[in-house]
Image (cartoon, grey):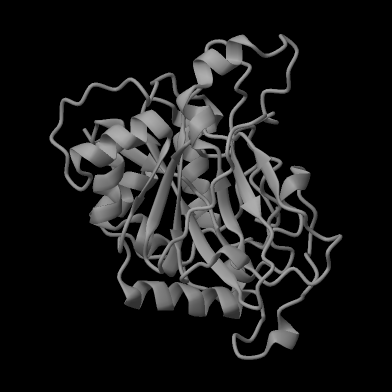
């Protein structure tokens, strides 16, 4: 297939049809597998948690090596780090943010089909039949061109919609972060008070662009292998990298499997089999088609087959 992206109307992920389950209000029925009761309470109240050392360092280093190779950069030569972005994103916030247009490499799937990561999402959703999102990674060099990327703050979902659509996202960091390196930023107190805050906002507000007012902007620091999970109702974004180091991370999420949605399942399988990017303004694909032409298809374990949708949970 020559298309840079899938041509279907949906992206192959949860936002294709929306999820009505309010993650803030789930009453646990399944026992917690990884999260502690305190972590789960914090997650529901403030919209994010950090789970330390989720990914082994061997897998961290393997993914870092692939990302450097895929981006045609040398980790030991900063002169190679400032390559131009090959295509523009419809979601303009992402331009210059270091997104890596690779979705199906073995190193990405090794983390997606990790039992520990899966168990964390079981804790979050309180159900076992989940699908993993088809997403990518980030390699963000120091911001040498001050006009190239200024950072951003947004919502992944339309928070002005009634009823709300709910979702979750996670970041696995591949390096130890510092405040100067920028990276993930969020507004947990706004999440905590969202329902009351929303009542004070104009009816025609932009549901994707938060006006945080006096709410504090938080910049959590992570160690390589840590995973930060956040609710999509959390106002969040990326802070500019003003250090002299590269920041690297993988995006992972899971959502309730929709096995009766044949179109969504078939799209996901086509993305994997043809090694192409999902549709949508947040994705643009790789015009070099390196994943398709250079790298073999990922091998999935039984859990990975179910998380993709090739095997049923039933």
Front-most of 309 and 82? 82
286 is higher (above) or lower (below) than 3: below
Front-most of 270 and 222? 222
Horizontal relation, residue 165 to residue 79: left or right? left
Image quarter (top left, top right, bottom left or bottom right) of the N terminus: bottom right
Residue 238 horizontal/vertical position (percent): 63, 52
Front-most of 142 and 26? 142
Q: Picture quarter containing residue 41?
A: top left
Horizontal relation, residue 257 to residue 18: left or right? left
Residue 178 horizontal/vertical position (percent): 53, 67
Residue at horizontal 50%, vertical 24%?
Answer: 18
Q: Picture quarter containing residue 7?
A: top right
Q: Residue furthest right?
A: 147
Residue 218 horizontal/vertical position (percent): 54, 46
Residue 126 horizontal/vertical position (percent): 24, 31
Image quarter (top left, top right, bottom left or bottom right) of the C terminus: top left
310 is higher (above) or lower (below) than 215: below
Q: Is residue 87 visible?
A: yes
Q: Is residue 257 visible?
A: no
Q: Picture quarter containing residue 101?
A: bottom right
Residue at horizontal 38%, vertical 47%?
Answer: 308
């Amino acid at each position: 297939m020559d298309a840079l992206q899938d041509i279907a109307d949906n992206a192959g992920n949860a936002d294709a049809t929306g999820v009505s389950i309010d993650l803030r209000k789930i009453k646990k029925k399944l026992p917690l597998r990884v999260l502690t009761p305190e972590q789960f309470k914090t997650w529901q109240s403030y919209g994010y948690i950090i789970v330390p050392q989720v990914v082994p360092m061997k897998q961290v280093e393997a993914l870092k090596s692939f990302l450097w190779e895929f981006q045609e950069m040398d980790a030991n030569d900063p002169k190679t780090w400032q390559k131009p972005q090959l295509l523009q994103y419809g979601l303009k916030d992402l331009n210059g943010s270091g997104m890596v247009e690779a979705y199906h490499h073995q190193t990405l799937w090794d983390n997606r089909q990790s039992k520990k990561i899966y168990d964390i999402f079981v804790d979050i959703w309180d159900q076992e039949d989940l699908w993993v999102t088809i997403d990518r990674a980030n390699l963000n060099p120091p911001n040498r061109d001050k006009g190239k990327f200024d950072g951003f703050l947004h919502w992944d979902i339309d928070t002005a919609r009634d009823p709300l659509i709910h979702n979750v996202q996670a970041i696995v960091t591949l390096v130890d972060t510092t405040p100067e390196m920028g990276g993930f930023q969020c507004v947990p107190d706004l999440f905590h008070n969202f329902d009351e805050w929303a009542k004070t906002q104009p009816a025609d507000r932009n549901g994707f662009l938060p006006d945080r007012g006096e709410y504090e902007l938080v910049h959590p620091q992570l160690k390589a292998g840590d995973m930060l999970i956040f609710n999509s109702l959390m106002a969040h974004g990326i802070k500019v990298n003003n250090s002299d180091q590269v920041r690297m991370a993988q995006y992972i999420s899971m959502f309730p499997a929709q096995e009766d949605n044949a179109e969504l399942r078939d799209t996901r399988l086509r993305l994997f089999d043809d090694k192409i990017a999902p549709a949508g303004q947040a994705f643009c694909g790789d015009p070099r088609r390196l994943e398709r032409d250079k790298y073999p298809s990922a091998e999935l374990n039984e859990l990975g087959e179910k998380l993709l949708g090739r095997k049923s949970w039933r």
